[in-house]
Image (cartoon, helix red, strand yellow):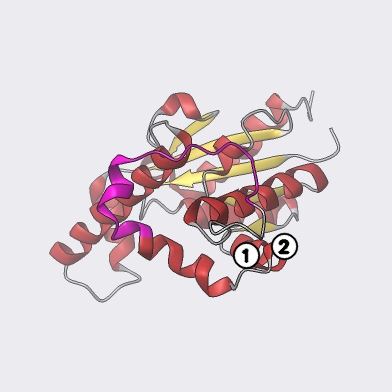
């Protein structure tokens, strides 16, 4: 197989992004997170600030939490009033994710990439999670909030990620059935999470006998 893509969804504070970067560095392949927003902006001609603001906009929209706008792969044309809608912003991100999967080996974090690429044979999906204590301790290392404030923030971020995922996919973000591999970083640590991803990659794609 010429190129292999690893998607990583992660619980806030679990270190999934860190693990993803470690995997990318180990394999010497590109790592994509918010870079996808810039690439989608370049592709669409829509100002990057709109892509950057969309999460905040959706998080404040109570209707978003109970509605669904399932991804269908269709790009809304520029002459439509909905060209800069949240749905089309997601569609352009998904278009970039598909183009990456078709052209190179890489690691992609977030953006419901596992769902967007669910029919691609060259893709493996990973979900990284951990217990509350581990996530809280790790999050506190990078922020100046009190523990109580951070815990509320963590719960808020994970709820939004779940709402975001369900809005566009119709599925539950935390459901293990959506992923090839689920890893508890609190028990394994980041190095062993990386090792497990690489081992699964080798077995899944028959890279080592």
> Could you say which is closer to the camera, residue 194 or residue 8?
8
> Could you say which is closer to the camera, residue 26 or residue 38?
38
Q: Is residue 179 above or below residue 62?
A: above
Q: Which residue is mark 2?
A: 43
Q: Is residue 62 above or below residue 177?
A: below
Q: Give the left or right position of residue 83, taking residue 120 as reference.
A: left
Give the x, y percent position of residue 6: 64, 42
Give the x, y percent position of residue 86: 48, 56
Q: Which residue is mark 1?
A: 35
Give the x, y percent position of residue 100: 74, 49
Q: Secondary structure at mark 2?
A: helix
Q: Main SS type for the magenta part? A: loop
User: Residue placed at 33% from the left, 60% from the top?
Assistant: 138
User: Residue placed at 53% from the left, 65% from the top?
Assistant: 51
Q: Secondary structure at mark 1?
A: helix
Range shown magenta: 58-76
Q: Give the left or right position of residue 58, taking residue 51 as reference.
A: left
């Amino acid at each position: 197989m010429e190129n292999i893509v690893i998607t990583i969804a992660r619980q806030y504070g679990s270190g999934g992004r860190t693990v993803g970067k470690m995997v990318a560095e180990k394999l010497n392949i590109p790592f994509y997170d918010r870079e996808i927003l810039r690439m989608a902006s370049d592709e669409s001609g829509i100002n990057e600030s709109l892509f950057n603001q969309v999460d905040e906009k959706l998080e404040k929209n109570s209707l978003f939490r109970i509605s669904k706008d399932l991804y269908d792969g269709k790009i809304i044309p520029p002459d439509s009033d909905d060209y800069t809608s949240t749905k089309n912003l997601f569609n352009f991100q998904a278009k970039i994710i598909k183009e990456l999967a078709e052209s190179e080996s890489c690691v992609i974090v977030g953006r419901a990439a596992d769902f967007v690429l669910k029919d691609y044979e060259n893709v493996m999906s990973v979900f990284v999670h951990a217990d509350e204590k581990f996530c809280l301790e790790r999050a506190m290392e990078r922020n100046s909030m009190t523990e109580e404030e951070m815990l509320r923030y963590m719960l808020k971020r994970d709820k939004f990620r779940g709402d975001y995922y369900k809005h566009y996919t119709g599925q539950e973000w935390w459901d293990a059935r959506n992923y090839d591999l689920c890893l508890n970083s609190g028990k394994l640590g980041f190095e062993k999470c990386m090792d497990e991803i690489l081992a699964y990659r080798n077995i899944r794609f028959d890279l080592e006998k």
